[in-house]
Amino acid sequence: MYHLIYVGIDDTDSSSGMCTTYLCAVVMDELKDYGFPIIGYPRLIRLNPFARFKTRGNGAVSFKVLVKSYEEFETVKNIILNRVKQLSHLKEENTNPGVVFYKVKMDDYNLDLDDLDSKLVLPSVLEDYSQNTVRNMVTIEDAERIADSIGAEIYKFKKGRGIIGALAAIGCPLDDSTFELLAYRMPVNYGTKRRIKYETVLEMDQNTYPCTFDNLDEEEGYVAIEPHTPCPILYGIRGETSDCVKKAQSMVKSCEPIERTAIFITNQHTDQHLKKISQISKMDKFKCYIVKGEVAENPHIIEGGHVILKLYDDSGSIECAAYEPTKGFREIFKQLIKGDLIVVYGGIGEKGTLNVEKFKIVKLANAYDAINPLCSCGKRMKSAGKNKGFKCPKCGRKIKDNHKILLEVKRNLKEGFYDVPPSARRHLSKPLIRCQIGKKD
């Protein structure tokens, strides 16, 4: 009796190193060496970016492996659990790995491995849980309850918080998806400066964009495929298809050897974390939204270079922030004025501020400069004093009217979308180029 085993893994890394995708790649390669077929691409699922105990990008992984007996299933489990124990940063306080196994009988399926992946349907309760984990705060108890209801096996290391993401990585629906090819370093090079030939990254970007994206931020001189942490990843290339990330990888050269590579199908850059909401008053902390409102007052700059404005609708108001790391995006955000109608995409943090990932201008308000009136002699008049009207500095003519003339000013902004640069983009946030090449908005 064949069984397809869904394997989910999460929370194996720490701020000082390791990467759950790397552990997944190691495990899959080891299982292949033992002769176990891996079905389809492994998944990299990014969860709620405001989750309290997340490490870096808050990503969990899963993959599928085919077994034909109980003994093979036990062998697979032992290989995986031993590797998780061996490679996880268990000495780190906030590293609490979790592994989930979900077994599906294959007697109702044709064992055509190339077609098998498309035939599988997971329990709706698991998909609902997974979507909830991307958008909301979920507890270990929530994960345990769902796992028990579908008959999944869970294994917890230390506190076992990783079972939350491990289960979500198995069940997360991918109505929209992207791919990421990850190239991993030799362990001897961990923590050292990465040696990528950056001119080849530029060449790759020129030849594969927009099928690959977020490779570079040329304005900031930022190489977006290169991590800036001591993790095992040398670089990661993101794209629309597996073929285009493979093509891109063939163009990128480095001055250090690559230990292995893996391609993941993922919810990255799909906006899956965002929920449309009709009223500002219904928004909560630690969740991500798409919300429409009117700019209540002109933006202002606070210490650190962050740009803040207040957005309101009939139900209430909220502060929105374009933070300093968004660089030039702040300059666009700063040009909004009172009365502009916009749609904001972003999430709410601990302080209750909506962190802006991108925004759409629906309608621009008219902008005016208030200027002194012209005298009949053609000279611009000056104030004659508080509440005393105006006086011409040339001919001396006076008028008692205190009202200035409003002159409409042409604005540099246009209706449409505005996005943060690749250097500031969240893993889940959809770049505008993906909207422009036919993906769901």
Image (cartoon, rainbow, N blue to C red):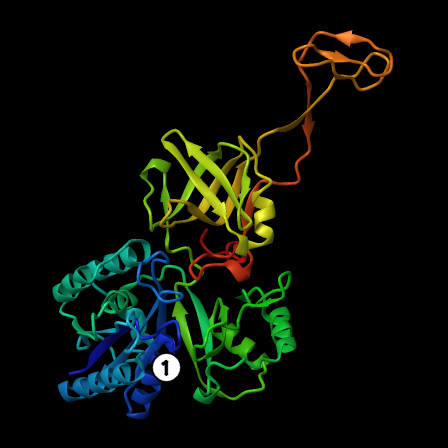
Residue at 24 percent across and 74 percent down: it is 6
38 and 203: which is toward the camera? 203
> Residue 277 location, x and y as percent?
36, 41
Residue corresponding to mark 1: 25
320 and 430: which is toward the camera? 320
Image height check: is 323 above or below 45? above
147 and 389: which is toward the camera? 389
User: Residue flagged by tag 1: what amino acid is it?
Assistant: Ala
Give residue 300's quadrant in the image.
Answer: top right
Give residue 411's quadrant in the image.
Answer: top right
In the picture, the quarter occupied by the N terminus is bottom left
Residue at 60 percent across and 52 percent down: it is 328
44 and 52: which is toward the camera? 52
For the residue labelled by badge 1, is the local secondary structure a helix, a strand or a loop? helix
Residue extending furthest toward the bottom: 34
Residue 359 relative to residue 266: left or right: right
Residue 68 visible (yes or no) = no
> Residue 151 location, x and y as percent?
13, 69
The local crowd at label 1, few if under 14, some if 14 to 19, many if 20 or more residues have their Cα within 10 Å, is many
Image height check: is 312 above or below 18? above
> Residue 272 location, x and y as percent?
38, 56
